[in-house]
Image (spheres, rainbow, N blue to C red):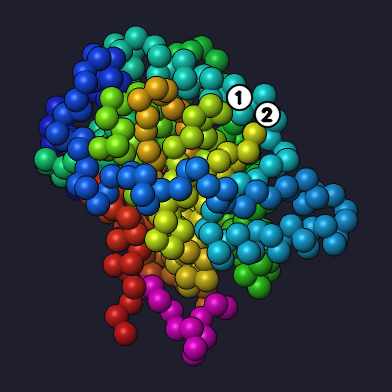
């Protein structure tokens, strides 16, 4: 893993570039024309949106309502791989506090942020690029990455101490999200025709992994030439995204279009990751998404990743493999799998596609 020891070039903070007031972005942020967020293939002005699902009935005792919500989730997983959940049980105040604490962190003096600078070995801390390819075209964003689970990887010293409430709020926020993901995992498992704990057990039961990446997208003087985050599917299991409450930017690929997500108030945006695609033998698919930036407003988002235990083999569940639907993927641990993105950075769906077993 020696090529993950350090960044191949000096790290430049995108926030510093943005704050310098430059009019033209440096060449290394300029995307090839086919990858730019051109208005002709993105649809932020139409009504298209990912499904919004009200979870309140999931916790009550109305069986019909619960069945209806499960059906809505099933359709969203099959048709979109992305949906928003409202009335999910996590307090709106906690969501706002979590986002606000991170906004304050990104507005803290640079020397404080630099004291958390990350390396590609674990990615933990304050970072400004994904992937270690020398000369790569970079994304217009900074981020902070931290581990929440397993407990052996959770290290408060690697979490920001600024603002002072940050660690406590993030701890509470992540705890609530682990519970919400556990509830969604049961729904997905039942919807796949399995026992309700089956999918969770395939993730390693209680020993799941969970981490948080907080994305900070500074204002960009030439937003039509670059992306805040290049197209990718998430390598893990499930992602729970808390988007900015003021600024849109997330785009989801639907067929050959890019749909700009219009977030519902205090919703989480849920998406299927590559590990659920593998376990479900592609009944559910992870979906490409990317982030556009803009010249007027910065944007903050919190992406919480709920992942399988990192050292157990993940392969299609035998209940979902039949003669007509043979296993599409060989077993691979999540540790092995995520090396790809740690080395190469976001690359559409190329990783999960490249895994397909030869036929
Ligand atoms: O900022 C966003 O809306 C999306 C972030 C994302 O896709 C990620 O962190 O993987």
Q: Is residue 193 left or right of residue 221?
A: right
Q: Is residue 13 visible?
A: yes
Q: Is residue 126 visible?
A: no
Determine which residue is flagged by label 1. 96
The reply to whether discs 1 and 2 touch (Cβ–Cβ < 8 Å) is yes
SS at mark 2 in the image: helix
Provide residue 283's location: percent of width, then percent of height: 52, 71
Q: Quadrant of residue 337?
A: bottom left
Q: Residues within 10 Å of mark 1 (few under 14, many from 20)?
A: some
Compared with 63, 249 (above or below) is above
Q: Quadrant of the C terminus?
A: bottom left
In the image shown, does 91 or 165 lie closer to the viewer? Answer: 91
Determine which residue is flagged by label 2. 92
Question: What residue is shown at x 49% (from left), y 88% (from top)?
Answer: 324
Highlighted magenta segment, given as a residue range: 319-330
Provide residue 273's location: percent of width, then percent of height: 46, 55
Distance, label 1 to label 2, CA atoms, is 6 Å
In the image shown, does 55 or 261 lie closer to the viewer? Answer: 261
SS at mark 1 in the image: helix
The picture quadrant for ligand 1 comes to top left
């Amino acid at each position: 893993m020696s090529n993950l020891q350090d960044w191949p070039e000096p790290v430049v903070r995108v926030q510093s570039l943005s704050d310098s007031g430059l009019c033209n972005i440096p060449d290394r942020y300029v995307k090839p024309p086919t990858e730019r967020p051109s208005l002709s293939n993105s649809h932020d002005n139409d009504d298209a949106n990912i499904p919004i699902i009200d979870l309140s009935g999931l916790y009550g005792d109305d069986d019909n309502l619960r069945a209806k919500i499960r059906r809505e989730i099933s359709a969203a997983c099959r048709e979109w791989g992305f949906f928003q959940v409202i009335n999910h049980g996590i307090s709106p105040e906690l969501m706002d506090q979590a986002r606000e604490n991170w906004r304050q962190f990104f507005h803290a003096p640079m020397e404080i942020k630099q004291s958390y600078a990350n390396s590609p070995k674990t990615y933990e801390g304050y970072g400004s690029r994904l992937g270690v390819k020398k000369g790569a075209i970079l994304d217009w964003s900074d981020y902070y990455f931290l581990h929440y689970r397993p407990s052996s990887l959770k290290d408060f010293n690697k979490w920001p101490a600024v603002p002072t409430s940050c660690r406590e709020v993030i701890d509470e926020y992540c705890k609530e999200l682990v519970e919400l993901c556990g509830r969604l995992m049961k729904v997905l498992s039942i919807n796949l025709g399995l026992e309700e704990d089956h999918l969770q057990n395939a993730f390693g039961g209680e020993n799941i992994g969970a981490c948080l990446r907080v994305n900070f997208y500074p204002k960009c003087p030439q937003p039509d030439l670059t992306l805040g985050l290049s197209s990718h599917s998430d390598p893990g299991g499930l992602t729970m995204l808390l988007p900015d409450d003021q600024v849109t930017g997330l785009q989801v690929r639907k067929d050959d279009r890019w749909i700009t997500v219009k977030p519902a108030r205090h919703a989480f945006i849920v998406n299927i990751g590559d590990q659920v695609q593998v376990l479900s033998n592609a009944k559910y698919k992870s979906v490409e998404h990317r982030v556009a930036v803009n010249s007027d407003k910065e944007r903050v988002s919190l992406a919480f990743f709920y992942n399988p235990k990192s050292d157990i083999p993940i392969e299609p569940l035998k209940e979902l493999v039949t003669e007509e639907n043979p296993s599409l993927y060989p077993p691979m641990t999540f540790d092995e799998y995520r090396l790809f993105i740690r080395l190469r950075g976001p690359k559409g769906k190329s990783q999960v596609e490249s895994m397909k077993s030869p036929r």
